[in-house]
Amino acid sequence: MKYAIAVLDIGKTNKKVAVYDDEMNPLAVRKRKIGTIRLDDLDIEDVETVEAWFLEQLKKLGSEYPIRVLSVTTHGSTLVCVGSDGKPSVPPIAYTNEVPEEVHERFWAAVGDPLETQKVTATAEIKPLINSAKLLWYQKERWPEDFLKTENILFYPQYYGYRLTGVPSADITYTGCHSYLWDYAAEDWSSVADVLGIRGMLPKKPGASESELGVITPDVAAATGLPGDTRVTLGIHDSNSSLVPYLITQEQDFVLNSTGTWCVAMHPTDKVDFAADELGKMVFYNLSYANQPVKTSVLLGGLEYETYTDALMAHHGRKDWPDYDPAMYADILSDSQSFILPTVVPGTGQFPNSVARVIDGDDIYPVADIIEGCRWPKVFDDYLAGFALANLSLAIQTRIALQRVDLVPGTEVFIEGGFRQNRNYGALLGALLPENPLFLTELEEATSYGAALCGKALADGVSVKSLKKFVSLDKRPVEPAKLDGLEEYVEVFLRYLES
């Protein structure tokens, strides 16, 4: 082994350090849950604890492996305003903080039309504070005097890169991910940055994720025992990091459907273009590590599914997850009388104006009544029927999310993440997309792996694309369900949403 790469992988709750050798073989993974801390009435990212833990792990792992490159990847929608002392000038608040509606109203009064801004910045509005520009707006309003002390505004991967090297920067994947701060056509900071008065606090130009930010500072070298010439990549957004192995191995058109609490559909493309009915929805563009547009749609599929299945399990006193059986769906599809309709978190997903409810014949059950136990749909008395409705709702919403990233017949769809294990979901989605080959993929620690590929490209002085031979995607085809009445059911589902 000539060298090892250590990836600092910062999830919203789970933090990891993953180590790979120079052949991209995993050597070690260390994990720890580090959540937010409470300050006044806000959740704050605990950046000091995260940094201290990372340095501690690097010291331990550096004594076992010849770590010579550090690569950073983080969850989205987070940034840190840094003062002249290198520390946060205002609290690095979590994007999950709910703020008064008046904050959003003042933001738009200053910025202008939301739909026009979506077109220019390829950004959809996602509440609470998932849009970086709006998070900055709130920080500036909340702590105006402290905000004036800010010298550098750093996206989350670059904040940790800055702490490692002392060099401020930005990378293109984080800059271009629903921030409102990047003008896609001009390839420059947007007019929103000027409205906020922050252009001078941002780097002049974002760089490539695999490029070199710098080497570690003497303080970091002393704290970790790593050589002083240990190199650090510019850093990468987590969803884009997960996309890297697919981008460098797949020659054909594909969509990556990454499933979990947030279900994210990503379709690499060559232009930025919104259909009229996509404006105002959670449809936007990312920029890949290669500065390529990636049309993206999101929905809170995992959260929605969990809301109903948790209620079913609690009501029935069961913990089993039903396997796929066509008989589960026969009665539901034959009469099209029962539906689970989005959206559990208002304003999100592909139907932001829809009110979450269960339709059971002529009766309507708001999701809050079901969760609180006030009312219970008769159809939910059948455990399997309840799961069938949840699976149908998720699969239909997924098809629409995939269509909104310009899925066309013949395009392959890769399903990764939590719903790989749900055969019902795969079978239904396959039936709903008969002209698209569906595959389940298995890539351990995909986010860390993508970031490690960026680190290897830096270490070897080669392009990320040239590392194709190091990636092995386990592609397993999905067998579509054969169900009568499915499309008729979808038609009624959509009519309810449009009414």
Image (spheres, grey):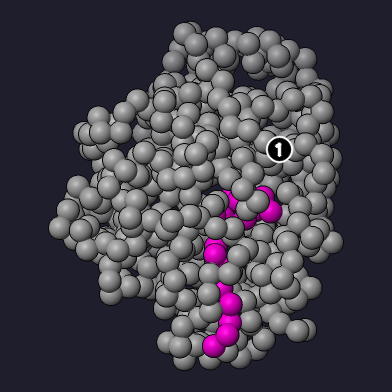
Kind of residue sitting beneath label 1: Val
Q: Which residue is mark 1?
A: 255
**Quadrant of res 126:** top left
Q: What quarter of the picture does the N terminus occupy?
A: bottom right
Q: Is residue 379 visible?
A: no
Can residue 52 be seen in this snapshot?
A: yes
Label 1: state its secondary structure: strand
Residue 405 in the image: above or below residue 233: above
* Residue 225 drawn at (x, y percent): 53, 91
Query: Does the magenta run of residues contain 332?
Result: no
Q: Neighbour class for label 1 at 10 Å: few (<14), some, many (≥20)?
A: many
Position in image of residue 397 (x %, y %): 59, 27
Looking at the image, residue 370 sits to the left or right of residue 480; the answer is left
Q: Is residue 151 left or right of residue 325?
A: left
* Magenta-tinted stretch: 228-244
Q: Is residue 230 magenta?
A: yes
Percent of width and height locating residue 199: 34, 51
Q: Nearer the viewer, residue 354 or 228?
A: 228
Q: Is residue 198 above or below residue 438?
A: below
Give the mark count: 1
| Point 79% across, 24% down: residue | 409
Between residue 263 and residue 294, name the one nearer to us.
Answer: 294
| Residue drawn where x is 56% and y is 42% of the image | 286
Q: Note whether 53 is above or below 33 in the view shown.
A: below
Residue 47 coordinates in the image, percent (x, y): 37, 68
Q: Is residue 192 above or below residue 21?
A: above
